[in-house]
Amino acid sequence: MSALTPLSRPQANSAPGRPPAPPAMTGRQKAAIIVRLLLSEGGNLPLRDLPDHLQAALTEQIGSMRSVDRDTLRNVVEEFLTRLESVGLSFPGGIDGALQMLDGHISATAASRLKRLASASAKADPWDRIAALDPEKLLPVLTEESVEVGAVMLSKLAVSRAAELLGKLPGDRARRIAYAVSQTGNIDPETVRQIGLSLVGQLETQPVRAFEADPVERVGAILNFSPAATRDDVLQGLTETDTDFATQVRRAIFTFADIPDRIEGRDISKVTRGVDQATLINALAGAAGDNDRAAAEFILSNMSQRMASSLREEMVERGKVKDKDAEAAMTAIIVAIRDLESAGELVLKTSDEDDD
């Protein structure tokens, strides 16, 4: 709005006996008129997105004006609308807006560098960036920084987010930070801004992760599709090397034997629809161990009696299935289950739900 140019007014000499034509209005005056008009109509203007000096200039201009006649108002509005209609393409404005628009289209490394540039911008509010971070990234600030810094951060976050973070702290630490909030009444805005800039610098200088999934998920996904002998051997080695990591990997693995514990019986029909019948028969007939046989029986018991009876007959006709073919068939069923989970059509039960 501050870029509006003065209205073009004829500069012809005034006729005798008439008052001289009023001087052309400045862009700032026109902006003040448009803002005043929109606010009177109940408009919600994002004026806080403007740099502070423009907000101050606009406020001062509005405060210095008294009234304008109808013709002037009409001319200013017409010029404003003409300018709006002539816009062919608009850009988000600033690095922050550009990053949101290009999210997913540029590399994580480039995005991280640009975020650091944006955080150093004179008009950027570092607390907007901090508020957008995941709670898990903010929690170390409350546990490792001084209680005064933690109190400032909680005061700048939304109440719900602050309460969530405070609830994750040990009782003594939470009480100390809560008390420190009561001491923040006289902190000047520039100090709060500098604290925000310092925190943004710390939080956004963390190295970009090369892998989206964590190590447990990646190892678990690999072992899911490994032969049983390989999976058991790797898990045994992991247990000898790092018991905690091995335990987490075991929880991340989902095998054919886990079907009764991790899948609702009503979802079995969805799974079997995604597997051809020959593969299903190989998996059911080739289930050798006690756990695998229990999973096969679970699948059959959650089908219609007619279909289950038909499959049992074909399993008898199929006879013994080679271990290699049975494992391939079981893997195909696991793939079908994972595809359903990714599509949101099936939810695997967690170990916590099983305990409940």
Image (spheres, rainbow, N blue to C red):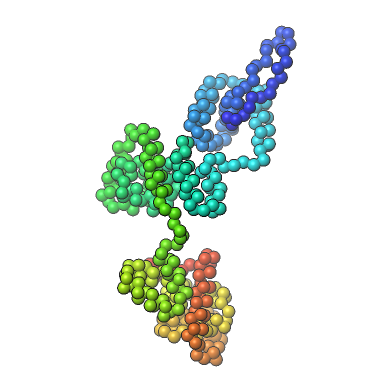
Q: Quadrant of the C terminus?
A: bottom left
Q: Nearer the viewer, residue 222 or 264?
A: 222
Q: Quadrant of residue 229?
A: bottom left
Q: Is residue 300 visible?
A: no
| Residue at far left of view | 172
Residue at (50, 70) in percent of width and height: 338
Q: Quadrant of the N terminus?
A: top right
Q: Where's residue 342, x and y in %?
A: 52, 65
Left or right position of 31 against 184: right
Residue at (33, 48) in percent of width and height: 142
Total labels drawn: 0
Residue at (59, 20) in percent of width and height: 67
| Residue at far top of view | 17
Q: Where's residue 323, x and y in %?
A: 47, 85
Q: Nearer the viewer, residue 257 or 346?
A: 257
Left or right position of 335 against 352: right
Q: Is residue 95 visible?
A: yes
Q: Taking 264 as reference, is 200 above or below it? A: above
Residue at (54, 81) in percent of width and height: 280
Q: Where's residue 135, x and y in %?
A: 40, 51
Q: Taking 302 as reference, is 126 above or below it? A: above
Q: Taking 105 as reference, is 6 above or below it? A: above
Q: Where's residue 62, x and y in %?
A: 54, 24
